[in-house]
Amino acid sequence: MEEKEIIDQSQLAQDVAEKIRYDFYDYFLVKPLDPIKVKKEVSKPVATGDPKKDKDGIEAQDFDKVETEVVEVNSDYRKGVVIKRPLLYDNEETKDKAVVKAEVGDIVLFRDAAGLRFDLVKDSRLLRMYDILGIERQK
């Protein structure tokens, strides 16, 4: 089922790319996918006893124990589908010098905070080639 989603994303990216009137000089236009969820251990202090007032009337409570639990949170990394490539990649003279070999429809990995929000295309980001950490390979 995951493989089918990748194929559908690729075809969708091709269709969307044809309708975008903008060309970008050195940015990839990427549509972020749903956030990646990861499990992390979180430690939180546990109160030992009731709050006690000190001589100034301020309530204080001791936290001598620590409780650890596993929670599911959003990863610092995110996947996205390449919708448009930089002009550099389509120029015959410079395409061999391209560092990132990402094609339209490829799924790339990047830091969630990376890139620029591009509100002219709904829910998209502009990423430089150095923001792209990897390309997901199809099985």
Image: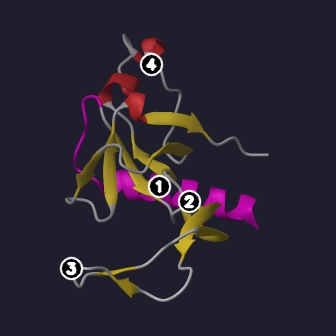
Q: CA distance from mark 1 to mark 3?
A: 65 Å
Q: Which label sits on residue 13?
A: 1
Cα separation, mark 1 vs mark 2, equals: 6 Å
Q: Amino acid at mark 3?
A: Asp
Residue 58 x, y percent position in the rendering:
25, 81
Discs 3/2, front:
3
Sequence order check, earlier mark of 3 and 4:
3
Q: What residue is shown with label 3?
A: 56
Q: Which mark is residue 79?
A: none
Amino acid type indicated by mark 4? Ala
Quarter occupied by the N terminus: bottom right
Q: Which residues are magenta?
A: 1-26
Where is mark 2, residue-wise? Answer: 9
Q: Are marks 3 and 4 in contact (CB under 8 Å)?
A: no
Q: Earlier in the sequence, mark 2 or mark 4?
A: 2
Q: State the image coordinates of residue 40 (x, y, percent, origin top left).
A: 63, 60
Q: Quadrant of residue 94?
A: top left
Residue 103's spot in the image, x, y percent?
51, 37
The crowd level at tag 1 (other Cα within 10 Å; few <14, some 14-19, many 20+) is: many
Within 10 angstroms of label 2, few (less than 14), some, or many (20 or more) residues? Answer: many
